[in-house]
Image (spheres, rainbow, N blue to C red):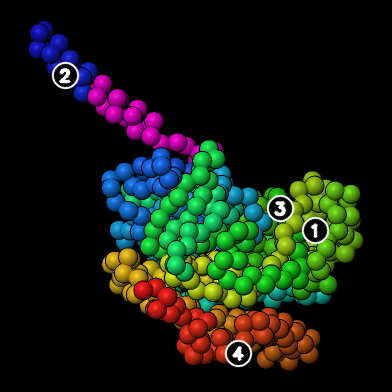
Amino acid sequence: MVAEYIYGGIIAVLLGFYLLYNSQRKKNRVKDRGSTEIRDEYVKNTANGECWWDNGEYTDVIVVGAGVAGAALAHTLGEDGRQVHVIERDLMEPDRIVGELLQPGGYLKLIELGLEDCVKEIDAQQVFGYALYKDGKNIRLTYPLEKFHSDVSGRSFHNGRFIQRMRNKAASLPNVRLEQGTVTTLLEENGIIKGVVYKSKTGEELKAYAPLTIVCDGCFSNLRHSLCDPKVDVPSYFVGLVLENCRLPHPNHGHVVLADPSPILFYPISSSEVRCLVNVPGQKVPSIANGEMANYLKTLVAHQIPTELYDAFIAAIDKGSIRTMPNRSMPAAPHPIPGALLIGDALNMRHPLTGGGMTVALYDIVVLRNLLKHLRDLNDASSLCKCLESFYILRKPVASTINTLAGALYKCWPLVTSISFARIWLGARLISEASGIIFSIIKAEGVRQMFFPATVPAYYGLLLSECI
């Protein structure tokens, strides 16, 4: 009987220690409304607001922004043993009408980065190609995936769900600190970026230092002007709707309607929802508030979409859940500064309808990771500059340009080689559209920068003398 009390006492003591330890851990952690864990494992110097890791180690890399690029980059560098500090202005689950379709190449990059499970448990849908519609006729074009595993395909999903999965994956690493805060300025000393100044979630101004700061905080970045020449063009707007409980004519395919005056895109974002993006040309769109947009969609757009989607399209309009987003065009125009790197919208090139921005961002991360793997000490200014110079050269814009044209030719080949004059005309129009996108990029960035980037070191390279 005495032995039972002794054993019971030992178990109670051990359980008490466990509960005490667990409660202390919970006090040091704060759960954000978007279910992303925030860890405050840093020590603040009250004299100047500086912060560093509580284990005495310094931050290797500061990542500004925790979207697709930022979250993937944080996880990747954390896996490689780097101390990473991620600062994101809002850790709630994003609610966007773009960034919802990942191309097969992007999925392959997710696998390469060990992030393929981020498209699981979010009701993501496989995408195997596109169906093109014109004047009531259509043709299905599938991705050439015969040589790949059956799991390799495109993926479409709710953007916010995908982002949160990636954020949680990054935050699960002990050497990645994910913090909600707004970066206000870059810390620059003698022409070298040393870190950032930011306001924490509570409004406290702090400074974070690292040998390398990577800015990937999206199209609304307030830091872009410091790192590139942000010549933003808005040729059109996306008008987004969610069609509920309807079936696409070609399951697991994106649907591009070559409508008048501009294309319309449909793709699944869950097992019961289809995203519709209507491209409205011009820098001003009809008002949603006074009903002009609903009238525009019903009178000018609805009759051009596939009949199988018509009722769901009208129902979505009547429901009133119409959203708009400017379709920004930003040619790559970086001003490389020692200690900082810009990844994201300002360097990405994507087709305005079929996407590709996420794929390009993930490609950039793979390139950067491979370069940084060979650089153990990021405080070595000379080696770090060489690494960043190599990054700018390796991500040649011409690669994306050639891929765009090759993709257009591949998709249009069945149309151009058919006997039907209508199909030949349709194929020629598609190639013409792709060429127009390509030539506009070449014009904006310059022939030399596009095709011979290594010959312009002042533009793409980082002068080592600036770093020493």
- The tag on residue 242 is 3
Q: Does label 1 or label 4 sit earlier along the sequence?
A: 1
Q: Nearer the viewer, mark 2 or mark 3?
A: 2
Q: Residues within 10 Å of mark 1 (few under 14, many from 20)?
A: some
| Magenta extent | 15-35
Q: Which amino acid does label 4 sit on?
A: Val
Q: In this view, does 155 lie to the left or right of 323?
A: left
Q: Position of residue 101 (x, y in %)?
A: 59, 63
Residue visible at 32% across and 53% down in the picture? 58
Estimate the spatial distance between the alpha carbons at disc 2 and disc 4, rounded to whole Å: 76 Å
Q: Does label 1 or label 2 sit earlier along the sequence?
A: 2
Q: What residue type is labelled 2?
A: Ile
Q: Nearer the viewer, mark 2 or mark 4?
A: 4
Residue visible at 57% across and 90% down in the picture? 448
Q: Does label 2 or label 4 sit earlier along the sequence?
A: 2
Q: Is residue 40 visible in this depiction of the protein?
A: no
Q: Nearer the viewer, mark 3 or mark 1?
A: 3
From the image, which quarter does the N terminus lie in? top left
Residue beneath disc 2: 10
Q: Where is residue 167 in the image (x, y as percent from the top left)?
A: 47, 51
* In the foreground, 282 or 105: 282
Estimate the spatial distance between the alpha carbons at disc 1 and disc 4, rounded to whole Å: 44 Å
Residue beneath disc 4: 447
Secondary structure state at the residue bearing disc 4: helix
Q: Does the magenta stretch include residue 297?
A: no
Residue visible at 83% across and 72% down in the picture? 261
Residue visible at 57% across and 61% down in the picture? 223
